[in-house]
Every structure is written in structure tokens, then in C-alpha cells.
Amino acid sequence: MSADWHENFGIKPDLALKIGALWGKSRKRAGGSTNLLLSHLLDTAAVAEKIWDHYLAPSAKKRLDDISRGRGRLFFAWLCGIHDCGKATPAFQSVDDEGAEAVRRAGLTWNAHAVKRNPWRHDKAGAMILRTLLREAGWDAQQIAWLWPLVAGHHGSFPSVGVFSGRTTARGEPQGKGPAWSEVQRALVETFTRLLGYEDLAEVQPTAAPSRAVQLQLSGLVVMADWIASDERHFRGIDNLADVSLSRARSRAADAWERLGLRGGWGVLDLPASDAFRERFGQPARPSQDLVIRTARHMPAPGLLIVEAPMGEGKTKAALLGAEVLAARFGADGVYVGMPTQATSDPMFGQVRAWLAKLGDGLAEQVTLLHGKRRFNKEWRALLGESGDDADSRFDSVAEDEFGMAEWSFCEDDEPERKGPAAWFLGRMRGLLSPFVVGTIDQLLYAATRTKHVMLRAAGLMGKVVILDEVHAADVYMSQFLKEGLRWLGQAQVPVIMLSATLPPAQRQELVAAYLAGAASQEEFDVRDLPEPQGYPNVTAACLVDGRAVYDVAHVEQWRKDLEVAVTVLQETPSSGTSNESAAGGLVADLIEERLAQGGCALVIRNTVPRAQETYQELRGRFGDEVRLLHGRMTAHDRAEKTEACLKLLGPPAEDGPGRPRRLILVATQLAEQSFDVDADLLVTDLTTIDLLLQRLGRVHRHDGVERPERLRRPEVVVTGFAPQRRQAPRVLPASEGIYGRYLLLRTAAVVCQAEGNRWFVPGDVPQLVRKVYGDEPDLVPPDWVGAERKAYAEWQDEQGKRARSAEGYLLTRRHEHTSPTLDGLHYGADHGRVTDEKLQAVVRDGDPSMEVVLIRRDGRGYRTLGGRWLGVNGEALSEELLEEVLGATVRLPSKLTKSAERGLTPLDGWRDHPWLKHTRVVVLDERGVGTLDTYTLRYDEQLGLIMEGGPQWQGRRRK
């Protein structure tokens, strides 16, 4: 701007002098020169323009245009830039001695003692300034009410309006008392507003208030713009007001955007052609897949699309093309695919990248893998190259001191050229901002928690199509966060596709009700008129049009014939003793020996790792190398190798494959329930709930063209882990009851016992079986079980209620506040500290956090890999090859060892500065292969995996 800019705006020279003294970034944090506050506001606004031009989804732009007379870009830039106006207060200007002295010389003073005694953050101060100035400018109270929380919350938490009380008394000194401060605050805001292109503050006023969910999205985008504009590498300080201008800010923003490599997704997407499925996936769509795509094409508004289809039906491919349709129709700019586990996320990462490669050049390189174990994924590491996965060391803008100033730790060197997502997206809480994301469903659940910076997660989800797989796996506690997330997505008009083998009718209704309640901005939504699917596979689509629910429920014939599955019960008397475990393994071994006399392949699924290990040992003693074991307490390397070997041996027939073995027995845990494409001739499984039992059954006779022994040409499931009894309810394994609850296991056992000696038609019988167990059918269990069932039901209801209520304290919205029109007080009562992803996972999954560690050996010379290769005295001798081996020795500890691991395990000294290993905790094994953690003894067996012995009780017995 020219030297006489203040005259053009009618600002007196002495007031211009004051504006030119206000600092926004200190010299220490702005590359050696103080960055004036007006400069930072313009920098942030210029970054917001880049976000609008190159990142924001078309749907988000339309919503902003709709509330700002078609000037959405200008309003968005103003909203982001104005966020730091609260720095024009003594509370902030006094923080840096050098900056404070310049402000005093310009004629702005304060009572240092009062300011120090009454801490006041600049985010809240900015909200207070705007509440006053916007009211004076003639803004409606409704517009002021939704806008001020976005300014007050830009450091991660939304306060309540009550924080402003008392700031006009002596406690108001940090806000700035007297006419001089009021005058400069007004001048700063008005100058910034006019420099952007508005005539005055009155012209900025929107014509309508956006929904609360869109407010949360905008808040996250404000934070995004602020953090980018605070990067001193690209926004070095400008300390002369004559050098501050919007054009210069735009030049700096353009340079920063290009060097950071930031971008959005596919932009405006064309509606897929009729033959798009074949083009994307190399095969024609099956009837169920075509149903999904047709339903997506006909939805009158963004909504929820639930797909229920058998395992192996191709739901994922249908969902991806359905996402294309919904994105093209409703202006989404990317996708988030949420999977139930890390193990299922990894293969999905590759599938999504392959799909995006067909949509446009460079899109496959923009996919972010988002879970805590991603650094062990080879495809992810190859995508990132040498830059690693340690963005937080370069973009450490989350940690703040008590005054709200960021502690920056930027790397001065430019990054090497890379193909993966921009490193900026890889920092904590920013992953969902990446245009395409594959990760665990936890990422959505985190966005439904009342935690700091939740607006960043929300901003990442809104503007995408959200795909959630295996949603039936959510229990009652986890479902509270899932439904809360659906409420916000519904209010933000984010299209959601949910996939499941089958859903209990009550769960389907709850999910639809949550989404529509959000869309209607209501506390509850009546979905009693939601039709129930009459066939299988089926789809249920729900959206809101003019305040009314519109449903589309349809089904088609499945592409394969039903399997006639024989149901057998193998009675087992539950006991916690090891001798009984061996006896149980013997029963299974006897059965398998008889069934596999002519050869064949059996899958044995146990509900706990120790039980799987016991069964494996029993079977190994009888069948030798024909037995394999797979569970979650194996090292990453061993688990990957064993999984790959099983998939090759039992996966779809392949001309170049090793061929199906004559006889093979795979013992596994719940890992085999989902996204595990193996084909067994026979399934032996512990009793579990009916939906998960049917999931396990999906591994039997899964593939066509498989040669099977005569004895196994008809599929069979053998259910064990419980003991039917005469004239009383069956006994069930205590460990199974601890996992799944006695009530649903009793009802499942009743269905299994009714079918014993008969057959289930799968998947045709699936919906009916699930309805029986999860419904309220009164005569499902035999009369002799009724008393036990009633008791179990009362306990189950009580436990379900307790678990649902225990989630309420962490949910983003408190009970009865879903109709609130603004973000005022959203974080009331929340923990405002930093919460690690491990703790967040425990919050949303109702369990103690578990921890992954690396197993390392130590001898008299120093450290070695688990395989015995030399790592040096302190672990420092790391080549790329050795790093691969070290990472491959990662294993997950049981959750009961987490606290001990947090207290007692650290990285090796030689790893302190390593980008991949500096946060990795190590269990050191001695030359015998034994390690200790508190009172537990740990050892690793290549066949059995991690073995844990001892503990407090064991230690007590030893003392005796």
C-alpha cells in the first residue's frame, strides 16, 4: 500500500502509527523480523484464497456463496484473516518485550500488573472485539452469535459466552481499557476489511447462518489457513507498515502453497458413464453392485446409503463407484474410507489407489494412509520416499504456550521432491484434511469426540464422500460415537455409504435416525416408517428433502446360489484350566482327523490368543507341518508372511499359484472374520454372536473352481466353545462371555442348537438369523433356558446402558444440545489438554489402550535384531535393510501391559533422532530370548508368537 493509505481510509497519522506498531508474530518466530499484525491477517486471508481456489470442495463453496450473496470467496478470506484480531490487546502485545516496547512508544499503554494477574487469551479477546464491532455495524444478533465462536475457538476449543463477563471491569485491562485501545482495534478490523475489498463491516454480514456442522468445518479451515500463514519459511516478518499490502500477501501465499505442495482432490467430477464399472474394475457390475450405483444416481439429496450384501459380493467396488456418483452429483472433492482395523486398512489403501489411478493422473499419489501402524506399510513408505512420516517435527504448530503462541520447529531446508500427499497433511490431527484418505473408522469416531482441535478432523470429513466398511462390528459403546459422527455428517450434508454383511433391524434404524436427526437439526428423528428390506442383498437409502425423510429400500437376487451349510455342535465343557484347554484341543483334533481323512482344508477360529496357541500346539502334535497359526500377537513381519502364505494356499485359484494343499489346518483368532479372502472346506469355530458367526462362515466354500475331497463337498460349520446341558442353559466359555456377553451368546447358541443336524442356506438365511438373535422373539430359547436368558438379558441391558452412558462424557455434543444453532460452549467440560491417538482409541473403543513395541535382542556386545543381526552398542548401526528388519519385529502387547510399557519402555539411545524409530518403544530380550516387563515374562516364538507368562498372581504363587 502507499505511504498515504491512512488518508485514503480516513485514518489519522497517529492512529496509523499505532496500527503499525501492533505485532502479530515476534521477531523470533517470524524469520528474524517482526511480522506486523495487519500483515499476518492479510497473509492468512491470502492463504484462504488459495484454499478456496485449489482445495475447497464445490459443495463448500456453494454453501458459502449461498450465505454471502455470491461472494463466498471474499467472505471466506475475511473470516480466516480476521481470526487474530484479538492480538490487538495488552494481553498479547505484552508477551514479547521487544514488541511491547514498540507498542508503548506508539502511545498504547496498559497496567502491567493487572494484565499479568488476569490471563486472557487472544482468541477470546478477538471474539469480544468482534461481538462489539459487528453489533455496532448493525449485524443481526443471529449472525454475530455463530461467527464469534470461530474466532474464539481457533486455538482448538470453543468457549462459552460466559467467559466475556467481567471484562469491562478491572479484569478488562488485558482486553485493552480506554479509548486508545478501542480506537486502534476498530481501525485494525476496518482497515483489514476494506483492504480485502469490502466497503465496511456492515457489507460483510452474511444473509443467513450456516448449519452448526458447516460452522465446525469453517472453523477447521480457519485453523488450517492460520497454521499455513504462520510458517516463517514462507511468511517472514514485515515490520514496516508501508510494506504491508494484500498483493504482497497474495504473492507470499502463492509461493507457500506451491512449495508446500498442497492441493485438493478431483475438483468438479463428471457423472460416471454407464460402463464406468467395467472401465474401473475390468469386469461388469453384478446385480447388487448395479443396485448400489443406481440408488446413488437417484438419491434426491445427499444422504445415507446402507449396503447389505454377503461376503465376497464386491461391496467395496460398488461403494467406490457409488462415491463417484455422489461426488459428481453433490459436489464432493474426495473420499474417506473407514475400515474396522489397521489390518483391513492396508489392502484397502492399495485398492483405493488403483481405483483413483483410473480417474485421473496424480490422484493415486494423493492418498493418505491414516492409522498408527502406517509406517510399517511398504506401499506407504515407498510413496513417501526418503522424507519419512515425521511431519510433526517440521509443522509443530499444535503445541501452545499459555498465551496461545505456537512453538514452531520448522525445518529450513526445502523438502526433496516427493510423490505422496503433501507433508503438511501428515501431522497430528491433519490427516483427514488430505483429499483422499484410507484408515480405520477411528478417524471418524475421533471427529465425534469433545477434544481439542476436533474442528480439523471435521473439516477433513466435510466435503468428502464417506465410506464405512464392516459397520456391524461397532458395539454399543463405539456406536455412540458412530451415531454422533453421523449426526454431524448429516447436518453437513456429507454423503455416507455404509457397508455390512448384514445389520440387525434396530441397528439399521438407529444409524438412519442419527443421520436424519443431524440433517434436520433435531435431537431425535422418527424413522418408524423406514421400510425393512424384503430381500438380500439390499440397499437402504435415506435423505431429507424439504424437512421430510425420503427412503429408497430395494433388493436384488444374489449372484451366487445359496450354500447349504451343515451345522454341527461339538460340545465342550468350559473351564479356565490349561488341562481342559488341551482336552478341548483334543476334541477338535479328533474331529478334524475324521473329517480330513481324505484330505481337505480346515479353518479353526478361537476367541482368544492363548486358546488359539493351545489349539495349535495340540493339532501340531498330531498333524505336524500341515498346521498353521495366525493371530494378532505376532510380529508385523511374521504376521504379514503367514497371512500372505495362507492367502496363496487358500485364496482364489490362480494359474501361477502354488496350488491348494492336500491337507491344511489354519488356526486363527478373530483376524479371520473380515477381509480375509481364504476358502476352507470346513469351519470349526468358538461360539460367538450370530452376525460374527456368519462372518466367519463366509470363509467356507468361498471360491468357485476348487477341487474338494468327497467328504467335504458340502460345507460344514462346527460350533464349539460351549456345552449344551439337559434341563438348563448351556455353559459358555468365560472368556467368550467376557468378550461378547452372555445374553447374545445364549440366543446364538439356541439358533445353533436348533439347526444342529440340519442346514443353513447362506447367505439367504442371513437376515432372518440375525433378526432372530437380535430381535425380541420370545420363544427363541428352549423353556429350560428362559430363566438364564432373562437374567442375562437384564445384565446385558444394564451393561449396554452403562456403556452408552459412559460414552456421553466424551461425545462432541452433550445430550439435548443437538439443536443448538452455534458452537458456543461446545467444549464446555472437555479436557483441553493434548490427547494422544492411543488414548483417543481407548476412548472411542471402550478399552484400555494397547501398545506396539519392537522386539530387540541384546548380548554382551550390544543390540541385535530379533533375527540376530548386529545393530551396534546403542542400536545406531541402521541401514535401510536393517531398518526393514527392525520394523518387522513390531508386535502389539496385551492391553493390560500398556501402563507398564509406558513407564518402563523407551527407544534405544541410538534411535533418538531417527525419523521412523525415535518414538518406538523396545522390549529387550536376553540371549535366551526372554524379556521382562514388571512382573511379566515375555518371550517370542516364531511359531506361537508372543507368549506372556507371570504377572502379579503368578509372582505371588512363586513367593509361596
Image (cartoon, helix red, strand yellow):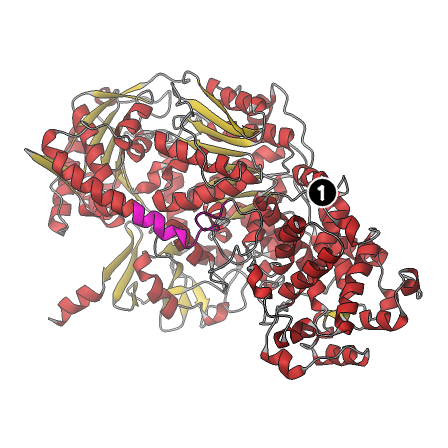
Taking depth in this image into account, of 221 and 159 the one nearest to the observer is 159
Q: Position of residue 300 (x, y in %)?
A: 58, 25
x, y percentage for residue 288?
Answer: 46, 21
Q: Position of residue 749 (x, y in %)?
A: 19, 33
- From the image, which quarter does the C terminus lie in? bottom left
The three-letter amino acid code for the residue at tag 1 is Thr
Instruction: Determine the residue positioned at 39% across, 73% down.
Output: 861
Q: Residue under label 1, please give it.
A: 207
**Closest to the observer, 660 or 261:** 261
Q: Secondary structure at mark 1?
A: loop
Could you tell whether 535 is left or right of 521 in the image? left
Say left or right for 260 vs 1: left
Can residue 852 be seen?
yes
Query: Which residue lies at the image location 40% right of the left edge and 32% below the top edge?
Result: 509
Tell me if residue 289 is in the magenta stretch: no
Name the residue located 58 percent from the left edge and 62 percent from the top edge: 398
- The range drawn in magenta is 801-818
Q: Residue furthest left?
A: 726
Q: Specify the quadrant that holds the N terminus.
A: bottom right
Label 1 Cα crowd, 10 Å radius (few <14 / some 14-19 / many 20+)? few
> Compared with residue 32, is residue 896 higher up or lower down, i.e. above or below?
above
